[in-house]
Image: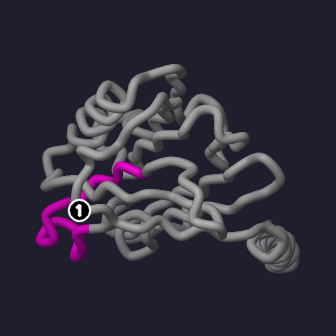
Amino acid sequence: MNKRQHIIIFLMLLSYGCSFALSKERLIPEPLKDGKSIQGTFTLILYGANHSNDLETIAILDREGDGYDFEPFAPEFVYRIKKNLPANEALSEAEMFVGWHHSFRSIRLSKITDEKGSLLGYEVRPLYYPLDFGFSDILDVNYFKSGNKIIARIKLMESVEKINSGGDSSGVLE
């Protein structure tokens, strides 16, 4: 590709990313101190863990019956879905799913609510040993409300992506 093609692709991606972020209502997860109070039935979304060093791994518990569905902004082969799980089973599976990596230290459980404070679901995020990646929390996760969907955009922090890919996250071979 020549320089002009790179610029055109960059501008297209930039405009798409900006319109995505600006056209949706962003939801911010709030960390919980205790997961014992989680009740109800959930759809469990298991995102990542697709290869031996897949750090882009997280679990989402989507509360059933609330009129909203969580949907990862990714191809379907990147995640798996399990429906109609009781809270304790969904949380247990989520914790096992995110805790497989050799650098795993603990989890952070967060609730995801809408603008009125209504519970939509939970996020089970792995935390890693900071010496391995420079941070304990290495994911950049954003939730956007769009109609009756909650879109989850999940990626590694850029600095961790560079470490994980050997220093060059551009994906361009020269």
Q: In the figure, 137 relative to 51: above or below? A: below
Q: Is residue 21 left or right of residue 160?
A: right
Q: Nearer the viewer, residue 40 or 70?
A: 40
Across and down, in percent, residue 4 comes to: 87, 78
Across and down, in percent, residue 129 comes to: 13, 64
**Magenta stretch bounds:** 123-136
Q: In the figure, 141 relative to 77: above or below? A: below
* Residue wearing tag 1: 33
Camera sees residue 173: no
Q: Nearer the viewer, residue 95 or 48?
A: 95
Under tag 1, what secondary structure?
loop
Question: What is the number of callouts on the image?
Answer: 1
Camera sees residue 22: yes
Q: Nearer the viewer, residue 119 or 150?
A: 119
Which residue lies at the image location 53% right of the left edge and 56% below the top edge?
154
Residue 55 on the magenta segment: no
